Amino acid sequence: MILGRTRQAFLITTESVAIAAFLVMLGASVLQVTFRYVIDLPLMWTEELARLMCVFTTYFGSVVALLQREHIRVDLIDGMLGPRGRLIASVASNILVICFLVVFAIGCWLMAAGTRGMETATMPWFLMAYVYYGVGIAVVIMIAIVTVDVISNFIALARRRAAP
């Protein structure tokens, strides 16, 4: 019950961040087109802001897809396995995903540390480290989600073994 509420809170939070980033990206793109082609006075920062918000939209949207179990999945192997085999395959693939995400999170941390004082090219108020911190937060949330799924699958495997 608590796990379900926590998952729902993560869903609402990450979905809100993804939507906000998308709206900022959309607004920056509209500003860019309006100022460039209508007013003939291009704004230099709008393209960069839209690109960086696309990154946030992508990673926080990935968390949403993971929470809703809507990520891309090849079910060819699942069709050949029984229920126990599917659980084992799920555990194995999720452990590989966790390994990848941990390396990714370490990379985000290192990049954030390396760009802590570095401004973006056109927006001196937006540090490059913000991008890596944001992506890192999304990745850490993904690690937590997949870890909970692995634990749940281990519990399900133990129950199947204990059943007559």
Image (cartoon, grey):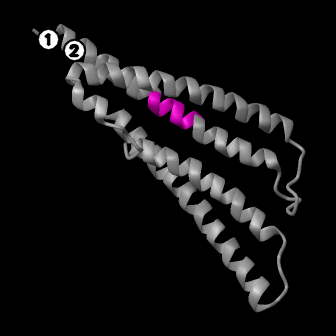
Alpha carbons under labels 2 and 1: distance apart: 6 Å
Quick check: 95 left or right of 85? Answer: right
> For the view shown, which residue lies furthest in the bottom direction?
38
Q: Are marks 2 and 1 in contact (CB under 8 Å)?
A: yes
Q: Quadrant of residue 158?
A: top left
Coordinates of residue 16 in the picture (x, y in percent): 52, 57
Q: Is residue 30 above or below residue 55?
A: below
Q: In this rendered view, identify the residue nearer to me: 113 or 98.
A: 98
In this picture, which residue range is highlighted in magenta? 140-146
User: In the rendered picture of this protein, how many numbered marks are placed on residues?
Assistant: 2
Q: Quadrant of the N terminus?
A: top left
The structure residue drawn at horizontal position 65% and vertical position 31%, both measured from the top left corner, is 105
Coordinates of residue 97 in the picture (x, y in percent): 50, 28
Quick check: 82 left or right of 67? Answer: left
Q: Which element is circle 1 on?
A: loop
Crowding at dot 1, Cα within 10 Å, few <14 / some 14-19 / many 20+, comes out as few
Indicate whether residue 141 is drawn in magenta. yes
The structure residue drawn at horizontal position 28% and vertical position 24%, both measured from the top left corner, is 86
Residue at mark 1: 163
The structure residue drawn at horizontal position 47% and vertical position 44%, both measured from the top left corner, is 10
Residue at mark 2: 159
Query: Amino acid type of disc 2?
Result: Arg
The structure residue drawn at horizontal position 82% and vertical position 56%, both measured from the top left corner, is 126
Coordinates of residue 82 in the picture (x, y in percent): 19, 23
Q: In this rendered view, identify the residue nearer to me: 62 or 140.
A: 62
Question: Which label belongs to residue 16?
Answer: none
Q: Quadrant of the C terminus?
A: top left
Indicate whether residue 58 is drawn in magenta. no
Crowding at dot 2, Cα within 10 Å, few <14 / some 14-19 / many 20+, comes out as few
Query: Amino acid type of disc 1?
Result: Ala
Q: Which element is circle 2 on?
A: helix
